[in-house]
Amino acid sequence: DTEVTQTPKHLVMGMTNKKSLKCEQHMGHRAMYWYKQKAKKPPELMFVYSYEKLSINESVPSRFSPECPNSSLLNLHLHALQPEDSALYLCASSRGGGNTEAFFGQGTRLTVV
Amino acid sequence: GIQVEQSPPDLILQEGANSTLRCNFSDSVNNLQWFHQNPWGQLINLFYIPSGTKQNGRLSATTVATERYSLLYISSSQTTDSGVYFCAVGFAMRFGAGTRLTVKP
């Protein structure tokens, strides 16, 4: 099983809303990632968790708040977003240790109105 | 940080043609993957290939880590091969800008 599950698949939120994106994997992977992808651009790294600890934060604005409650689950909490934050948000996982294959979820398409 | 360059940026082929996509990277890496992104945004694993050569059906890939490049070969292309092909390198998986492939019937 190489499945990474993201929910919801689509999300529309207002600029004053608080919402969360969820990512789950049951492959025993210990590294999990959040990416943001705008139309016709490559995925852009936001955060990396390794063994449930935040190891990379690509200077992401604080209105995006990641959380890794356990090794199978990764959340991205959203608050006070701007319309320019509308994008496809992708989650990935890998075994960890710096030398392993990564698998992506189907993404959450976020629209901020 | 590591720089990743892909070429060509766009490629248009007739069905049945062969193609080679290239990924250059600026520093030594122990992770390199090729992905195909379908029209719905799903990133599909093609190859995990930090070095050496792998083949899967009509697709194959070669990474020469010492010279910091990787090649993806697509033979006998089909319309379903259309989409964007990305390489990603390093533990943090930095993506290149991609190659947008269009295969015409």
Image (spheres, coloured by chain):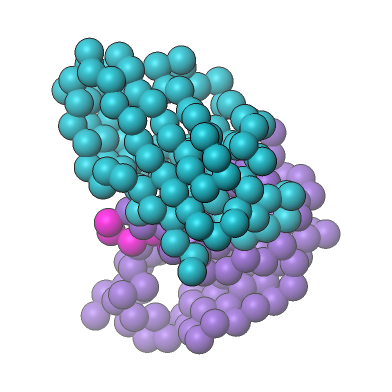
Secondary structure character of the magenta stretch overall: loop
Image coordinates of residue A20 in percent, x first then y, are 33, 30
Residue at 33% x, 17% y: name it: A79
Can you tell which quarter of the image residue A56 is in? Answer: top right
Task: Chain B: give its colour.
Answer: purple
What residue appears at the point 60 percent right and 53 percent down from the top-left corner? A29
Q: What's drawn in magenta, residue-wise?
A: B36-40
Q: Position of residue B36 (x, y in %)?
A: 43, 63
Q: Colour of chain A?
A: cyan
Query: Would residue A78 be found to the left or right of residue A51 on screen?
Result: left
Q: Residue furthest right?
A: B66
Where is residue B29 shown, x and y percent of the image? Answer: 75, 51
Q: Quadrant of the C terminus of chain B?
A: bottom left
Q: Is residue A88 above or below residue A100?
A: above
Check the image and name the residue furthest to the front: A70
Q: Is residue A5 left or right of residue B71?
A: left
Quarter holding the N terminus of chain B is: top right
Magenta residue check for B3: no
Percent of width and height locating residue A99: 73, 55
Above or below: residue B15 compared with residue A16: below
Could you say which quadrant of the image residue A3 lies in? Answer: bottom left
Residue A104 visible at all: no
Q: Residue at x 31, y 75 (%)?
A: B80
